[in-house]
Image: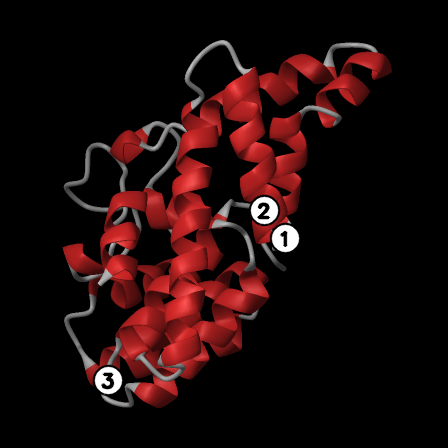
Amino acid sequence: MANTTLRRTVILGRPGENLELREWPFLGQLRALGRCPDPARRAWEKTAKARGLSAAHDGRLQEAIRLLEQARIELPWRDDEVEANLNELRAIRRLEKKLEVRPNDGPTLITLGKAYFAQERGDAALDCFRRAAKAMPGSAEPHAMIGLELHFRGDATGAEEAYREALRLQPSHSLAGLYLKDLLRGDPPGGGPVAGDDAGARPATTSSEESLDPGTVAVIAAG
């Protein structure tokens, strides 16, 4: 059974961790709207921010960037969710252009896949990770990310196979090891206990250069 945990909370940490501020304001606003009459909900859905986030989720990159830039102008305060999504979407656009020139560049495929993953675009993410696995046959990271995406989908057999392949290639791969344990316990990714981890955060990658924050993605894309 597929779980409903947002993918970006695994890559970026739970809401409020790692300076990741997008989740709390959005969910809080939705909860408030849930207590309002239908006209209030319809009004929210017509805002540039709501339409931009919806376009981002559907993969309509240019439209999403345009609407979120409009929301930035309209909002009377700095909205961290809007800023973070804009940075991420612009990075995706740069990475996609980079792949047009070098379609089999493994590190770019992995980074773009993680960006898609954080935007809840699971099919696009999985395609990137599988292409990266072919481009980098000796690398564990693509297989670990394939396992993570399949884990989210509830494909336990496929996820276990991918995690074990990552560990065969790199026995010390922390993401594959931790999430395989979660899988075997029947937990979602990041759902199990971590010894000595008071904050409950889960490492998302084995290298700080591979972690997905907008600044890192932008630097990689610009290179």
Q: CA distance from mark 2 to mark 1?
A: 6 Å
Left or right of 32? Residue 104 is: left
The residue drawn where x is 28% and y is 86% is 136
- For badge 1, the amino acid type reads Arg
Task: Determine if residue 144 is in view.
Answer: no
Q: Which mark is residue 60?
A: 1
Q: Nearer the viewer, mark 3 or mark 2?
A: 2
Give the residue number, with chain letter if any, for mark 3.
168
Taking the image as shown, residue 53 lies to the left or right of residue 8, namely: right
Query: Where does residue 144 sit, x and y in percent of width and height?
Result: 34, 71
Picture colour scheme: secondary structure
In the displayed structure, 51 sits above or below 10; it is above
- Is 51 on the left-hand or right-hand side of 122? right
Q: CA distance from mark 3 to mark 2?
A: 36 Å
In-front residue for pair 159/215:
215
**Which of pointers 3 and 1 lies earlier in the amino acid sequence?**
1
Quarter of the image for the N terminus: give it. Answer: bottom right
Secondary structure type for disc 3: helix
Specify whether residue 172 is in view: yes
Residue 107 position by quadrant: bottom left
- Amino acid at the residue labelled 3: Arg
> Is label 2 in contact with label 1 (beta carbons under 8 Å)?
yes
Lower position in the chain sequence, tag 3 or tag 2: 2
Residue 28 lies, with reference to residue 176, above or below; the image says above
- The residue pinned by badge 2 equals 56
